Image (spheres, grey):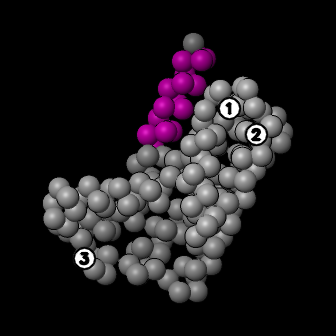
């Protein structure tokens, strides 16, 4: 849980251009800490799901396992491209990792907003309601899709 908390704290720091520009060593150190936390959190989550499962059963297991796998993949790729000094690919994977790193916060915020707006409509204590089933993927995949669209448009603009 500590690694997950650090992940949520460190990820936004990496986005500040002035940090990268003025203190590149700090950017690298906090980036490595972020990568380590992301990998530890992803592995711990995947192991937990494999051994104990989630409260929401198979549907939640699948959504959260994909989330953990994508988080680990983004962390490894961001690190790999940083070491290779391929800054553009590093940036793209680091942005994906950022979206995934704030996923647990997004999950809580989206549930909070949903409960305030609907009084928990389509959500059940065992996480089997329609909203719960959507949220197994809805707290991270739509945001990743939006990021991919932004990255695609940026890349297209740069080519022209």
Q: CA distance from mark 3 to mark 2?
A: 44 Å
**Count of number-bearing discs:** 3
| Viewer-nearest of discs 3 and 1 | 1
What x and y, as percent, mark residue 79? 75, 47
Residue occupying the point 66% across, 36% down: 91
Instruction: Check whether the beta carbons of the residues at disc 3 and disc 1 lie within 8 A of each other.
Output: no
Residue that carries the numbered disc 3 in the rendered image: 124
Among the two numbered marks 3 and 1 on one chain, the one whose residue lies closer to the N terminus: 1
- The answer to whether residue 78 is left or right of residue 126 is right
Residue that carries the numbered disc 2 in the rendered image: 26
**Image vertical order of residue 79 relative to residue 132, above or below:** above
**Image vertical order of residue 86 relative to residue 126, above or below:** above
Q: Main secondary structure of the magenta part?
A: helix
Among the two numbered marks 3 and 2 on one chain, the one whose residue lies closer to the N terminus: 2
Instruction: Check whether the beta carbons of the residues at disc 2 and disc 1 lie within 8 A of each other.
Output: yes
- The answer to whether residue 151 is left or right of residue 78 is left
The magenta region covers 145-159
Q: Residues within 10 Å of mark 3 (few under 14, many from 20)?
A: few
Q: CA distance from mark 2 to mark 1?
A: 7 Å
**Image vertical order of residue 96 relative to residue 131, above or below:** above
Q: Residues within 10 Å of mark 1 (few under 14, many from 20)?
A: some
Residue occupying the point 55% across, 54% down: 8
Among the two numbered marks 2 and 1 on one chain, the one whose residue lies closer to the N terminus: 1
- Most extreme residue toward the right is 84
**Image vertical order of residue 108 relative to residue 16, above or below:** below
Residue that carries the numbered disc 1 in the rendered image: 19
């Amino acid at each position: 849980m500590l690694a997950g908390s650090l992940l949520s704290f460190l990820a936004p720091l990496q986005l500040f251009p002035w940090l990268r520009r003025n203190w590149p060593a700090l950017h690298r150190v906090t980036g490595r800490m972020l990568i380590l936390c992301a990998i530890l959190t992803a592995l711990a989550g995947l192991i937990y799901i494999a051994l104990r499962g989630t409260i929401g059963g198979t549907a939640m297991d699948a959504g959260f396992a994909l989330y953990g796998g994508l988080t680990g993949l983004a962390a490894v790729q961001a690190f790999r491209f940083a070491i290779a000094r391929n800054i553009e690919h590093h940036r793209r994977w680091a942005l994906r990792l950022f979206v995934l790193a704030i996923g647990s916060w997004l999950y809580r915020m989206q549930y909070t907003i949903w409960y305030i707006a609907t009084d928990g409509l389509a959500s059940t204590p065992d996480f089997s309601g329609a909203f719960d089933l959507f949220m197994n993927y809805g707290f991270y995949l739509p945001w990743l899709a939006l990021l991919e669209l932004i990255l695609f448009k940026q890349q297209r603009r740069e080519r022209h």
